[in-house]
Amino acid sequence: MEKNAKAVLLRIYIGESDRYEGKPLYRYLVELFRKEGFYGTTVLRGITGFGMTSRIHSHSILRLSTDLPVVVEVVDSREKIEQIKPALEEIISGGLVTEEEVTICFYRSDEDEA
């Protein structure tokens, strides 16, 4: 991706225990985005959160949750994001998906330096 290019950040808020086709949902999504050739994906595990049910999920010693919040982030062109959204609607049975326009400051790997 070129420097200062416009892109879309898609954020998917799900639970750690969510599954799809026998796999953790976050792992399934990472594999899907990789297979579809997206620039990259990151999975973030939350320490506390709540969703539509307002039930708090927490990584507290007193209340150890087995369903911590997870955020899957993927950045790519508007076209690629729009292409994948119908599939995501089928795959994600519970959660929240948001998007926002972003500007790429730079995009490179360690291998670019070699």
Image: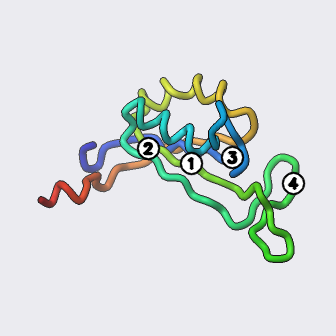
Residue sitting at 51 percent across and 27 percent down?
A: 84
Give the residue number, with chain letter if any, for mark 4: 54
Amino acid type, residue under disc 4 in the picture: Ser
Q: Which residue was labeled with disc 2?
A: 75
Q: Are marks 1 and 3 in contact (CB under 8 Å)?
A: yes
In primary-sequence order, the first of circles 4 and 2 is 4
What amino acid is labelled 3 in the image?
Ile
Q: CA distance from mark 4 to mark 1?
A: 20 Å
Task: Check if mark 4's residue and mark 1's residue have beta carbons within 8 Å.
Answer: no
Q: Give the mark nearer the N terminus: 4 vs 1.
A: 4
Above or below, 76 against 21 in this view is below
| Of labels 4 and 1, the one closer to you | 1
Residue at 43% over, 32% down: 78
Left or right, residue 52 beside residue 92? right
- Give SS at disc 2: strand
Q: Relative to the observer, which residue lies in front, 43 or 23?
A: 23
Q: Pinpoint residue 88: horizontal percent, then vertical percent.
A: 60, 30
Q: CA distance from mark 3 to mark 4?
A: 14 Å
SS category of the residue bearing label 1: strand
Q: CA distance from mark 4 to mark 2?
A: 28 Å
Residue hosting label 3:
14
Residue drawn at (69%, 51%), measured in percent from left and top?
Answer: 16
In this rendering, the answer to whether 64 lies above or below 66 is: below
Label 1, residues with CA under 10 Å away: few <14, some 14-19, many ≥20 = many
Q: Amino acid at mark 1?
A: Val
Image depth: mark 1 or mark 2 in front: 1
Earlier along the polypeptide chain: callout 1 or callout 3? Answer: 3
Q: Earlier in the sequence, mark 3 or mark 2?
A: 3
* The N terminus - image quarter: top left
**Farthest residue toward the bottom?**
61
Residue bearing the label numbered 1:
72
Q: Considering only vertical position in the picture, is 75 above or below 92?
A: below
